[in-house]
Amino acid sequence: MSGSHNHNHSHSIVSGKNLLLSIVLNILITVSQVIGGLLSGSLSLLSDALHNFSDVISLVVSYFANRIARRKASINKTFGFKRAEIMAAFINSATLVIVAILLIFEVVERFQNPQKIESLLVIILSSVAILGNGFSVLLLRKEKNHNMNMKSAYLHLITDMMASVAVLIGGLLMKYYQIYIIDSILTLAIAIYLIYVGYDLLKSSFKMLMLFTPDNVAIDELAERINKMPEVNSIHHIHVWQLNETETHLEAHIDFNKDITVSEFGLILIKIEKLLHQEYEINHVTLQPEYDKKDDKNIIVQD
């Protein structure tokens, strides 16, 4: 097989110090909210503590994934650990959805058995959580655009800060207006929002782990454009996948109209690489050249 690899990607090195500090802050917030939720009887405070605990898990996963992803490739790990952060994003987004479902079950139970809430403790601890999570959000604000892993960690923190704001509002309404049902209503709202923000990231990371074709790559169109090249008979047996967020790979068989030389193949390959990179953001290209080979010429062939 002849091939070419066009390395037009860049790697962002993300510092783990801010993640580590966020982990410590969230551990402190979680412990205080669990104690406060049990003492006050507030489901929304306990739900916020549960969300914070999922934050701790997600941040720990993100931290280690961030460190592991920097390890170099080796003989038995030819891609290195480049997909570690994608796996972390998948785990983190899945925990968001799972936590939300657990909260909905708790809300149903609380609607059936309403309880009086110690609102002052709710107000104090939700305020502490807002400050702690707000600081963590600021720490990761710039780094969230580096990759899916950092975005998942950031999403955990910002949704938890918003949840704490909702819990604070609920605490104020319970203290001054004795509207205790607001605790369950806010918990339900938090759960629905967690599902909303978690699902999109879960779907994106799942598609990447399953090696699905990226959304910006229309394989039929791509094949049609390459087939229009005068030297090409057909490009077929195409696979397109993302190794991570910066590396998109294409491998395929390409059938030529005549028995070309290696140097001629190299010139055609440069044109194909340029097209694929500029139009489809594909930066790793591996092509198997063929002439008059009796194989399956379908664009997609199940291996």
Image (spheres, rainbow, N blue to C red):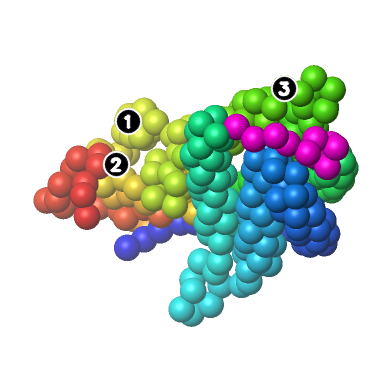
Of the residues shown, which amino acid type is indicated by label 1? Asp
CA gap, disc 1 to disc 3?
A: 58 Å
With respect to residue 294, does 220 lie above or below?
above
* Residue drawn at point x = 79 percent, y = 54 percent: 32
Which image quarter: residue 110? top right
Say the numbered circle drawn on residue 38: none
Say the numbered circle drawn on residue 235: 2
CA gap, disc 2 to disc 3?
A: 67 Å
Q: Choose the circle earlier in sequence order: 2 or 1.
A: 1
Say what secondary structure mark 2 lies in. strand
Read off the residue under disc 1. 220
Residue 219 appears anywhere in the view:
yes
Q: Is residue 106 left or right of residue 115?
A: left
With respect to residue 248, does 223 lie above or below?
above
- Density class for disc 2 (Cα within 10 Å; few <14, some 14-19, many ≥20) is many
Give the extent of the magenta segment.
Answer: 114-123
Read off the residue under disc 3. 179
- Asked whether residue 282 is drawn in magenta, I would say no
Q: Is residue 253 left or right of residue 135?
A: left
- Location of residue 102 in the rendering, given as x and y in whole percent from the top left corner: 51, 44
Q: Choose the circle earlier in sequence order: 2 or 3.
A: 3
Q: Choose the circle earlier in sequence order: 1 or 3.
A: 3
Q: Nearer the viewer, residue 103 or 146?
A: 103
